[in-house]
Image (cartoon, helix red, strand yellow):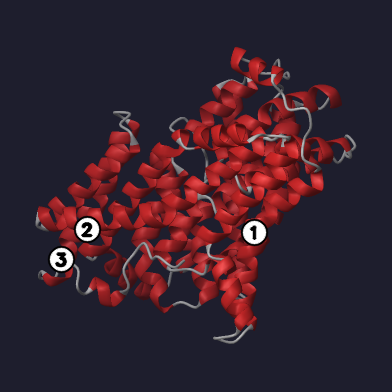
Amino acid sequence: MTTDLLPTLHLLAASPAADAPAIPAARLVPAALIGIAVIVLLITKFKLHPFLGLTIGSLAVGAVAGVAMSDVIDSYSKGFGATAASVGTLIALGAMFGKLLADSGGADEIVDTIVGRSSARTLPWAMAGVGALIGLPMFFEIGLVLLMPVIFLVARRSGLSIIKVGIPALAGLSAMHGLVPPHPGPLVAIDALKANLGVTLGLGVLVAVPTVAIAGPLFARFAGRWVDAATPELYSTPEDEERQGAKLVRRPSFGVTLVAVLTPVVLMMGKALADILAADGNAVRTVLDFLGTPLVALLIAVVVGFFTLGRGAGMGTRALATSMEKALPPIAGIILIVAAGGGFKQTLVDTGIGKLVAQWVQGSGISVLLLAWVVAVLIRLATGSATVATVTASGILAPLAAGMSTGEVSLLVLAIGAGSVFFSHVNDAGFWLVKEYFGLSVGQTIKSWSLMETVLSVTGLVFVLVLGLVV
């Protein structure tokens, strides 16, 4: 990306923490552990908003490490501002596009087209594809809410278990959330590790496809036997009924919707291919580098969506403006969390803990990819947040990326992403969303949703390690 979340090594040397005497390892390690513990405790025990937890955790790291608090605030502010400027704008544009996709009926068109052409045997595979496709431009929670009525209706009409239909769709959503940009987690890791977005996108899709197949339709066969759950009544609220009553007369076609959804992906992939195949200064590469920049690619996708999705559904100027306005408030908290995570990450970097971890790893012989996955898993289990796990793990491991090749850095991003979705349980909002929507008990949710997330995480790691042998 054009704006780096973490400073380069020469900028690190100029940071406030770098000007001070080197902090002993005996203080750095406890500082990092205590900072993470503070975040975990505040989020899980005291139910504090992650934004506040990450901010207080950053101050705790600096205090325990013995860094001047004014320097800690400078480090936190630098990381917060850089993240908000780079990733925050992408989150906002992604939310706008996702809302437009939903309001225009384009998402419904994708779902209806794919599901309508599937038999009972291939339906779980189709639902995995729907989940992945819908999850590509949308946040997990948005995609989850959007797909739930569809999952219920498909399960009821097909006579299949809600688990056999729903788990594949959720696997597709979750895989896109953890492995494929432009989701917040992968974007933060890409920024922190200075990974190539196009390469990461390509490798992410390469890992996600077989991972979704295993954690989705294949795992659902077993989960459907373990969990016997009736399909709930279609979730409906007065607001939903009002929206249905004002349903648009027409939808954009499947082909048009698909073009709109894949526009940012194609632009970013074009940039990656141009960087590999074309020489510096080549006119085509220059154009593709600009169009494939994440900010520009998503901005183009939103503008294209105005005409293909909005106008295709007969939405007027006022309806389009309303859709865009309503897209932003729900993601304000997400932007604050991600930016605060960037501040915490920068605090860790400026204390020198990242370099200490890098030295330890180099002398331990442990696979960097495996270590990245384990660190993300531990933070995920403790906080229940895939985004917090990705943010924190990428900050700790950022110095390791300095001497790695482009492909290896992208695989490091994916290893962190795979670890960030490991075993969703009671401290994860997604756990309760799935439980309540599916009408499951806590035990049933663990045997279906939580285990699916675990299979997804481990399978993703395996494919990342396999790619690591050849990249």
The structure residue drawn at horizontal position 57% and vertical position 34%, both measured from the top left corner, is: 323
Q: Amino acid at mark 3?
A: Pro
Residue that badge 1 annotates: 265
Disc number lying in front (2 or 1): 1
Q: Report crowding for label 3: few under 14, some 14 to 19, many 20 or more residues within 10 A (C-alpha).
A: some
How far is disc 3 from disc 2 in space, using C-alphas? 8 Å
Above or below: residue 232 compared with residue 335: above
The structure residue drawn at horizontal position 48% and vertical position 56%, both measured from the top left corner, is: 187
How many numbered discs?
3
Q: Report crowding for label 1: few under 14, some 14 to 19, many 20 or more residues within 10 A (C-alpha).
A: many
Q: Secondary structure at mark 1?
A: helix
Disc number lying in front (3 or 1): 1
Which labelled disc corresponds to residue 75? 2
Q: Secondary structure at mark 3?
A: helix
Above or below: residue 452 compared with residue 258: above
Relative placement, left or right, of 458 versus 379 is: right
Mark closest to the chain's N terminus, 3 or 1: 3
Q: Secondary structure at mark 2?
A: helix
Residue that badge 3 annotates: 16
Q: Amino acid at mark 2?
A: Ser
